[in-house]
Image: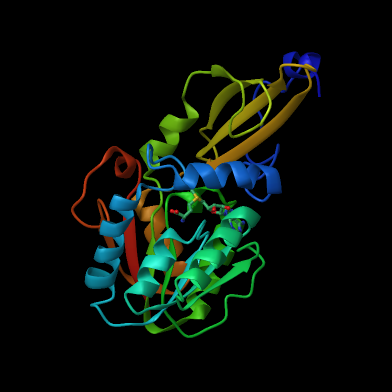
Amino acid sequence: MNLLDIVQRSRKPSPWSEGDKIPWNDPEFSRRMLAEHLDQAHDAASRRFEIIDRHVDWIHRAVLASKPTRVLDLGCGPGLYTSRLAALGHECVGIDFSPASIAYADEEARRNKLRCTYLHQDIRTADYGTGYGLVMSIFGEFNVFRPDDAKGILKKAHQALRENGFLLMEPHPFEVVRQLGEQSPCWYSGEGGLFSARPHLCLQESFWDAEGLVAIERYFIVDAATGEATRHSASMQAYTDDGYRELLAECGFGDVTFYETMGDLVSKAQSNLFAIVSKKH
Ligand SMILES: C[S@@+](CC[C@H](N)C(=O)[O-])C[C@H]1O[C@@H](n2cnc3c(N)ncnc32)[C@H](O)[C@@H]1O
């Protein structure tokens, strides 16, 4: 791809037509992303540890009533939630398709002798196993899945849970997704960064598909030395509160409760998300 391809790009891509998501599963990208997950200066890829500690405390006490159980974390990243839950006595399985994150999580579990198993797999196709007391999906990734994939993931989560087991989701509210889609175009330059280790420009634009209720984000990464461009794109489905309720009911979940945050901590990194706890009937 070159600069002319950027100039002649489609003015408004349809949802998911230019790719499913940013390249979490690319080995080089995942190494750079791992550094962002672990960076304690921001809450961009994962929250800072002090916030995660408090979330885990809330999950352990408020959701699981402090009773040890089996936990499945879908899109577990570097295992920042699972490792803490395992230290509290839970037996955890984490699934993620980022190779660097799974390698880090695995290494930490071995080093600290934690009862954690990590699977380097795609949660759309992975076999989740059964017998869990909690299945969770943390930090907004749920909205990035196409609606059919999202439904498939929830149905598999339902099968994986014991009777009366809990599903904990942390998705984006409708308005947050809409606003993401309505952001103005922006750009930055860097000597190296998340999308490339080389000097580059990142040109970003967003779209709101009012018909499908989907925000689309598109990035062109232009290599400063060669002028070659790479395109990345991610789409996010917006759901109303009733939309989440209907989806959960369709996938076999009841007793749905919405929480503004996981626990009482209100920080900037939480304001774009909320938590939903529901139960397998
Ligand atoms: C925003 S990060 C959150 C990580 C972790 N839940 C946390 O809060 O620290 C989203 C994670 O979802 C993973 N992910 C996205 N799509 C996936 C898929 N289809 N299969 C497995 N993992 C996926 C990414 O690799 C990434 O680690």
Q: Total of numbered circles in the picture? A: 0
Q: Residue at x 58, y 23 (%)?
A: 204
Locate residue 112, reporting x and y percent: 44, 71
Q: Is residue 62 above or below residue 47?
A: below
Depth check: 1 or 207 in front? 1
Q: Quadrant of residue 149?
A: bottom right
- Place of residue 33 in the rendered image (x, y in percent of width and height, measured from the top left): 56, 43
Task: Confirm whether residue 55 shows in the render.
Answer: yes
Q: Residue furthest front?
A: 111
Residue 117, picture quadrant: bottom right
Question: Taking 228 as reference, is 196 left or right?
Answer: left
Which percent across, then down, holds residue 132? 45, 81
Percent x, y of residue 150: 55, 58
Query: Coloring scheme of the render?
Result: rainbow
Task: Determine whether 86 is above or below 276 in the image.
Answer: below
Q: Residue at x 60, y 63 (%)?
A: 123
Rendered-image quadrant of the C terminus: bottom left
Q: Nearer the viewer, residue 17 or 139?
A: 139
The answer, for residue 21, to whether it is visible in the render is: no
Instruction: Identify which residue is drawn at 52% across, 56% down.
Output: 77
Horizontally, residue 244 falls left or right of residue 267, namely right
Q: Is residue 115 left or right of residue 229?
A: left
| Quadrant of the image where one finds ligand 1 | bottom right
> Which quarter of the rendering shows the N terminus?
top right
